[in-house]
Image (tube, coloured by chain):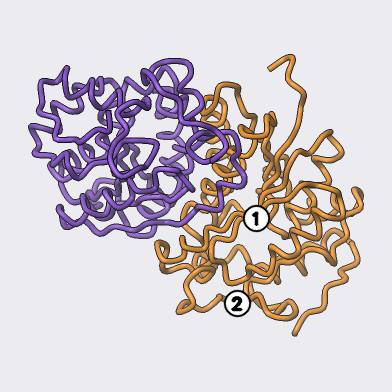
Chain colours: A purple, B orange
Amino acid sequence: MSDRKVSRVIVLSGGMDSAVALLWAKQQGHVAHAVSIDYGQRHRKEILFAGQLASLTDTPHTVVDMSSLKGLLPGSALTDDSVEVPKGHYADPTMKATVVPNRNMILLSVAVAAACAHDATHVVYGAHAGDHPIYPDCRPEFVEAMWHACSVCWYEPIELEAPFIDKTKAEVVALGEALGVQWKYTWSCYEGGDIHCGRCGTCVERIEAFEIAGVHDPTEYAL
Amino acid sequence: MSDRKVSRVIVLSGGMDSAVALLWAKQQGHVAHAVSIDYGQRHRKEILFAGQLASLTDTPHTVVDMSSLKGLLPGSALTDDSVEVPKGHYADPTMKATVVPNRNMILLSVAVAAACAHDATHVVYGAHAGDHPIYPDCRPEFVEAMWHACSVCWYEPIELEAPFIDKTKAEVVALGEALGVQWKYTWSCYEGGDIHCGRCGTCVERIEAFEIAGVHDPTEYAL
């Protein structure tokens, strides 16, 4: 890969972690593309925030409509309207209801395809240590296995990066603050309402991360 | 995985290999679901054939619309109308024009998601040895890496199977004939016209495979 120009594609959900990952990637060098996926998520509103983040950083941005996946993946509170979004702490076992089966492999596969098509060398995603208890596809062993798959899926290896895999959410927020993330352009709430609900797992995690990091939280919550 | 009921999800394109893989999987045991993906392919007609194959075998079938991927993946003859479908032998370097970046990781990620959601234990896809020269995502090292990723992407391991990875296309046809595949319900041609063109790489491969296997080819070609 020695003579290839380093260039990154980023999985950009519009949440805090991917916002930080975007600025982290910009700091590393050239960001070729940001990719967001509409997988039928209840909070697809996050994609509008992804668009704003991409725009603020002059990053080409593509939204891939995979909303028909919704029919194939019943049972997750994020894609099945009949399943309620659980309230409480993000690491609580009840949060399993918010897991979308194999979501990150799907997101990564599309981002890697974009990297192949646009001759980028790296793909970045923002999984962090706080995700590990509940989400199998955010764990180090998943990242490592996907790293190997990405190294052989194309004529040139695509390098998968998960720079926050060992960081807590609060550490990600602290890094993002240092990098200048404009938090008001990030969206977390799984409910996808007008403002953040403040009670679902990811809202609780958001509030807690700002507090622990000692960073001002500009978010308006319905609490 | 000892006490889980073995059940398979199959990536069903509507081509010959996946038709054989479907009957192979039925022979092994329960097939929970067949998944086809509209990724904006010029020959999306193949999906109608996939539907017929699923129907003939009483297999639940879902088509996932990912046709908006087309905009993200320029440069492939299969998804970019401005790129002509090359004519000639399937293993010829000109066939690189038909490669859709990272297609198989995308297809597998969706099929694995279906397996997770429907409590299936295995995912089957029909990559064979004839694909190796041109398509990186049909090679044994890709299958092995994805096998590892599928084993850790969910709470239970999903086992990836590529039963034809060491077989030639002719061997796959011979196996399919023995299993009773109704070849008239399979579609290969990348052009996606009314009948098979007989001149594109996959038509040439189809004709050759029937000949070598000594199996009657019921296909009507435009030749």
Left of A86 or right of it: where is A221? left
Viewer can see residue B77: yes
* Residue named by callout 1: B63
Q: Amino acid at mark 2?
A: Lys
Nearer the viewer's eye, disc 2 or disc 1?
1
* Quadrant placement of the C terminus of chain B: bottom right
Question: Extreme bottom residue here?
Answer: B223
* Residue named by callout 2: B87
The part of the image, by quadrant, that contains residue B115 is top right
The numbered dot on residue B209 is none
Q: Amino acid at mark 1?
A: Val
- Of all chains, the one bearing label 2 is B
Viewer can see residue B128: no
* Quadrant placement of the N terminus of chain B: top right
Q: Label 1: state its secondary structure.
A: strand
Q: Is residue A201 above or below residue B196?
A: above
- Of all chains, the one bearing label 1 is B
Q: Is residue A7 above or below residue B159?
A: below
Left of B71 or right of it: where is B195? right
Residue A134 position in % (x across, y down): 44, 21
Q: Residue at x 76, y 27 (%)?
A: B6
Residue A105 position in % (x across, y down): 47, 38
- Report the front residue among A20 and A203: A203
- Report the front residue among A6 and A60: A60
